[in-house]
Image: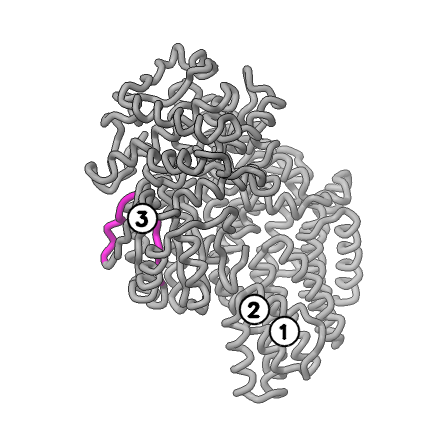
């Protein structure tokens, strides 16, 4: 959900108490540059951070932005995750930290890093860099222990008070009503029993929520009695099963929480380190070996009790869901978790049971699991001996997604595939890491199929890295090799590395010729042709594209590579000044894309039609085509394409005499160019047109008014600026 500027997660349930903590945070965010909320798992750090950031967001000109670090297994994707969170999709060859520092350098914003405990060292180093170079930056972190960054101000988050304050009891009642609006604490003795539950659970919000979810199977009084019995006996709990008997015990009615002496149980054998070692459970991370040990055991016991309330198949699903890094739907849950006694239909039923138990949270048709509960399930996945099998299923599922997305490129679902690939980025990376270690063929196929989506979504570094690693991992022939070379070339081209793009274009061509792969030839012609266009060789691009299109006559007209190869023809004809031919070719291409529901190529056909109309002295028609391009690129979340479209739209508006409006659109375009890390770019013929139209805009309103409008566009929230650019009324 969008705040005035920025992004913060939705609050999907009521917020209870915390007035003192919010007041303290208000002061901290006003007077300190870095604040860390610390406390044990389940104490409510994330909810408190969301509420505090939402209250503070309007004080920051560039808004409040949120990065969830809990899905990251290590620091490999830390920088891309933070960059994504603040809207940076860098298209350059710079070091990622350099690009991030430059992007944040003049910003006045609040950055929230949630669940940083397992990345303390890397987060501390990153924050030291960006806080030094970005003087308008304020950072709020949630962690189970301080990061140790210089200037860090630590705020401890205690449990909700259970004696003399109604907060814990209010939370219990709210969660009862959220599950069943008719539920309450109206029966005699209910309120006292609920208060006893909260006291037993020591005011830990997650433990209280899990307990409230158990009311569907017990009365409040029964629940209080069961929790009292369980907590009184927790010092003599069950030990964890050995792997040979784990599955049988998992499916037995008594299967429950690990006991003392179990790694990660209530004993002291779990690793309380800093999260840097293999196998360290975040559930066990504490600020200090002596801090919150009792509350930590209370939460672990509460989770174990909730685990026991689940049916055997719900417990099995809980464990098998843990490889998922991002939100998921029922189809993904079936793909990743079905097997043995857990049939696809049973997955659906068990998933709804976990939602009822508050183990899994539901938001529309999407589901997610809190990191603390995921960690508990992961521990049982290990005890069941299913860690490798679960990772195999997860990798197969996301390889399947990559295949379907690749096949659906030119169909009516292209936009939704873009969004799925973007939204599941962390799961795709995790699947690729697993495949690179255990299934090289699968990794090579996946990196080739998903790479172009990543390039267009702004994940250029990941696209290049995984394509290179897949090529280096072992022999690869045929279309998979050509795709990997193609991904490397396209990513290099978008980063302005034309020499590397040219090299991989030649390798694609040679491989596709050897394999007699017509689609590979079309892809190679697109890559080589675009490289030639960007380096001022349109005639060579036109000749090569025409030759390959004739050679690949058997490839369907709506093939993705065929459409992109036609796009090279359109670009080249425009660059050569053959505008009538170019307009006809662009119009034909656009219609073909429209028939198939294809947006990516259609947007660039619109871009060419806008440029042609501008060159022909038809600025109103140019603006119409430019707005059509922008609408398509916005659907695809393509910041690079939006930057190009804003440039051509601003030129068309300037050519109609609306100087101030053109200046504002130019300013918004400049903001998007900064977002991708480039100065203004585009094919060479655009430069002179842009310069001429900028001069027209300045002449129309004067330098001072032009500069004011430009700065307004540059400082606008990107969404606000784009919406203003898409308005069709001219302000002369």
Look at the numbered discs 1 and 2 and tell me whether their residues touch, using CB distance below 8 Å: yes
3D distance between C-alphas at marks 1 and 2: 8 Å
Q: Earlier in the sequence, mark 1 or mark 2?
A: 1
- Is 146 included in the stretch rendered in magenta? yes
Q: Which dot, 3 or 2, sits closer to the camera?
A: 3
Locate residue 410 relative to residue 80 in the image: left or right: right
Look at the numbered discs 1 and 3 and tell me whether their residues touch, using CB distance below 8 Å: no
Q: Position of residue 439 (x, y in %)?
A: 48, 26
**Camera-nearest residue between 458 and 34:** 34
Q: Kindly identify which residue carries mark 2.
A: 669
Q: Residue at x 64, y 45 (%)?
A: 523
The crowd level at tag 1 (other Cα within 10 Å; few <14, some 14-19, many 20+) is many
Q: Which residues are magenta?
A: 138-150
Q: Kindly identify which residue carries mark 3.
A: 157
**Camera-nearest residue between 169 and 723:** 169
- Residue 626 appearing in the image: yes
Q: Residue at x 57, y 89 (%)?
A: 702
Q: Position of residue 50 (x, y in %)?
A: 43, 53
Question: Looking at the rendered structure, which numbered label has been put on residue 650?
Answer: 1
3D distance between C-alphas at marks 3 and 2: 43 Å
- Is 297 included in the stretch rendered in magenta? no
3D distance between C-alphas at marks 1 and 3: 50 Å
């Amino acid at each position: 959900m969008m705040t005035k500027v920025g992004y913060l997660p939705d609050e999907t349930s009521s917020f209870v108490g915390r007035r003192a903590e919010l007041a303290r945070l208000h002061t901290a965010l006003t007077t300190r540059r870095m604040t860390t909320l610390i406390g044990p798992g389940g104490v409510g750090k994330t909810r408190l951070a969301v509420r505090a950031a939402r209250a503070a967001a309007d004080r920051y000109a560039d808004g409040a932005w949120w990065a969830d670090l809990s899905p990251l297994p290590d620091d490999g994707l830390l920088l891309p995750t933070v960059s994504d969170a603040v809207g940076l999709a860098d298209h350059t060859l710079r070091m990622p930290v350099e690009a991030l520092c430059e992007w944040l350098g003049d910003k006045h914003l609040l950055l929230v890093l949630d669940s940083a405990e397992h990345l303390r060292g890397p987060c501390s180093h990153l924050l030291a860099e960006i806080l030094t170079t970005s003087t308008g930056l304020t950072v709020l972190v949630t962690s189970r222990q301080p990061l140790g960054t210089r200037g860090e101000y630590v705020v401890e988050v205690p449990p909700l008070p259970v004696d003399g304050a109604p907060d814990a009891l209010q939370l219990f009642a709210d969660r009862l009503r959220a599950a069943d609006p008719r539920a309450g604490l109206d029966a005699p003795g209910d309120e006292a029993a609920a208060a006893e539950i909260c006291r037993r659970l020591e005011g830990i919000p997650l433990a209280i929520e899990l307990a409230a979810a158990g009311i569907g199977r017990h009365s409040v009084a029964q629940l209080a009695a069961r929790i009292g019995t369980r907590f009184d006996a927790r010092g003599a709990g069950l030990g964890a099963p050995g792997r040979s008997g784990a599955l049988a015990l998992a499916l037995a009615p008594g299967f429950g929480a690990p006991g003392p002496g179990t790694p990660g149980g209530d004993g002291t054998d779990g690793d309380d380190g800093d999260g840097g070692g293999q196998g360290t459970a975040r559930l066990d991370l504490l600020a200090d070996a002596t801090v919150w040990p009792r509350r930590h055991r209370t939460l672990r016991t509460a989770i174990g009790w909730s685990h026991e309330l689940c049916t055997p198949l719900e417990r099995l699903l809980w464990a098998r869901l843990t490889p998922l890094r991002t939100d998921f739907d029922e189809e993904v849950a079936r793909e990743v978790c079905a097997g043995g006694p857990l049939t696809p239909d049973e997955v659906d039923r068990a998933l709804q049971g976990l939602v009822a138990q508050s183990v899994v949270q539901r938001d529309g048709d999407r589901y997610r699991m809190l990191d603390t509960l995921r960690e508990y399930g992961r521990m049982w996945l290990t005890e069941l001996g299913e860690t490798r099998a679960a990772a195999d299923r997860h990798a197969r599922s996301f390889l399947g997604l990559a295949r379907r997305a690749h096949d659906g490129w030119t169909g009516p679902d292209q936009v939704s595939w873009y969004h799925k690939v973007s939204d599941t980025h962390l799961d795709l990376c995790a699947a690729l890491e697993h495949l690179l270690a255990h299934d090289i063929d699968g990794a090579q196929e996946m990196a080739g199929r998903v790479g172009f989506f990543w390039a267009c979504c702004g994940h250029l570094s990941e696209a290049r890295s995984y394509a290179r690693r897949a090529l280096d991992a072992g022999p690869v022939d045929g279309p998979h090799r050509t795709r990997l070379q193609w991904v490397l070339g396209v990513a290099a081209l978008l980063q302005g590395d034309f020499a590397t793009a040219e090299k991989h274009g030649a390798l694609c061509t040679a491989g596709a010729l050897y394999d007699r792969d017509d689609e590979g030839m079309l892809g190679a012609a697109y890559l080589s042709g675009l490289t030639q266009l960007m380096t001022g060789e349109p005639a060579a691009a036109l000749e090569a594209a025409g030759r390959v299109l004739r050679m690949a006559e058997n490839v369907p007209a709506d093939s993705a590579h065929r459409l992109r190869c036609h796009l090279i023809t359109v670009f080249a004809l425009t660059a050569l000044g053959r505008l009538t031919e170019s307009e006809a070719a662009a119009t034909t291409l656009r219609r073909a894309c429209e028939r198939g529901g294809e947006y990516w190529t259609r947007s660039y056909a619109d871009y060419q039609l806008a440029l042609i109309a501008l060159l022909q002295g038809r600025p109103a028609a140019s603006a119409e085509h430019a707005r059509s391009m922008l609408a398509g690129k916005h659907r695809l979340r393509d910041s690079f394409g939006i930057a190009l479209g804003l440039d051509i739209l601003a030129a068309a508006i300037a050519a109609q005499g609306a100087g101030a409006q053109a200046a504002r659109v130019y300013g918004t375009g400049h903001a998007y160019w900064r977002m991708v890390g480039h100065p203004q770019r585009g094919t060479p013929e655009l430069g002179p047109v842009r310069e001429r139209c900028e001069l027209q805009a300045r002449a129309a309103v004067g330098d001072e008014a032009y500069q004011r409008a430009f700065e307004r566009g540059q400082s606008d929230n990107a969404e606000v600026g784009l919406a203003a650019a898409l308005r069709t009324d001219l302000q002369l």
